[in-house]
Amino acid sequence: MFFWDSTYILVIIGLVISMMASGYVNSTFRRYSTFKSKKGYSAQEVASLILQQSHINDVGVQQIAGDLTDNYNAQTKMLSLSETVYHSSSVSAIGVAAHECGHALQDNKNYVPLKLRSGFVPVANFGSTISVPLILLGVLLQWNQTLITIGLFCFSFAFLFQVITLPVEFDASRRAITILRDGQILDEEELAVVRKVLFAAALTYVAALLASLLQLLWMILLFGGNRRND
């Protein structure tokens, strides 16, 4: 059973979905990486401008290593832009930077789903860390269903984190489009490109949710219900 099980197809499907979504966002970003901002703004300049226009003075902007590793840390009040985004004046890079600014705006406005996600991070990390050892221990102890059930419950925290993440990311993209338009940073033609880039990025979160659900279902089918290898 530990070498092959028909339920593994669920994990494979989840991996394929995630890989397709990741490939799509990368190809979309690259496709529009030559579409330069008409006003010549770089992504870093746009991020600073958005924060300034929003009267957010306690958030810094920095460059970090990696490709599309952009993020906003509510704990350190730091907006980090990847090497491929920070200095780029492409509309796609500006869209990514504006999306991260959307998270800073959420934080500034005490957006409840963002606070919930931030608070749930240690819970999700704990669940992911402890779940598999509990399940395996339950199996070794002659399929102790109590331990296995607790392990599956902890494993579900990763799925719940993805559920909480989805509205946070969608709202950040909505805020990004609004402030780019209202602040007259980009025109409608440029905003159309940003929408495509952010839509592709949103699909990665949908894919992560589906992959997490399939993995949880796989674990339940594999270990739930006193399933034994008799």
Image (cartoon, rainbow, N blue to C red):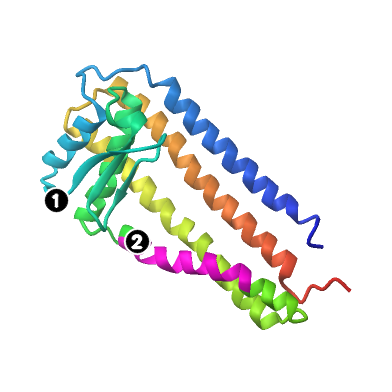
Q: Nearer the viewer, residue 109 or 27?
A: 27
Q: Secondary structure at mark 1?
A: loop
* Magenta region, residue range: 115-133
Mark 2: secondary structure = helix
Q: Which corner quadrant holds the C terminus?
A: bottom right
Q: 78 left or right of 217?
A: left
Residue under pointer 1: 58
Tell me which secondary structure the magenta stretch mostly adopts. helix
Instruction: Please say if the residues under marks 1 and 2 sit with CB atoms less than 8 Å apart.
Output: no
Where residue 223 appears, as percent x and y from the top left, is 72, 69
Q: Which residue is mark 2?
A: 118
Q: Is residue 118 magenta?
A: yes
Which residue is depicted at the point 62% across and 61% down? 216
Question: x%, y% of residue 48?
Answer: 17, 37
Q: Amino acid at mark 1?
A: Asp
Residue 115 location (% of width, % of height): 30, 62
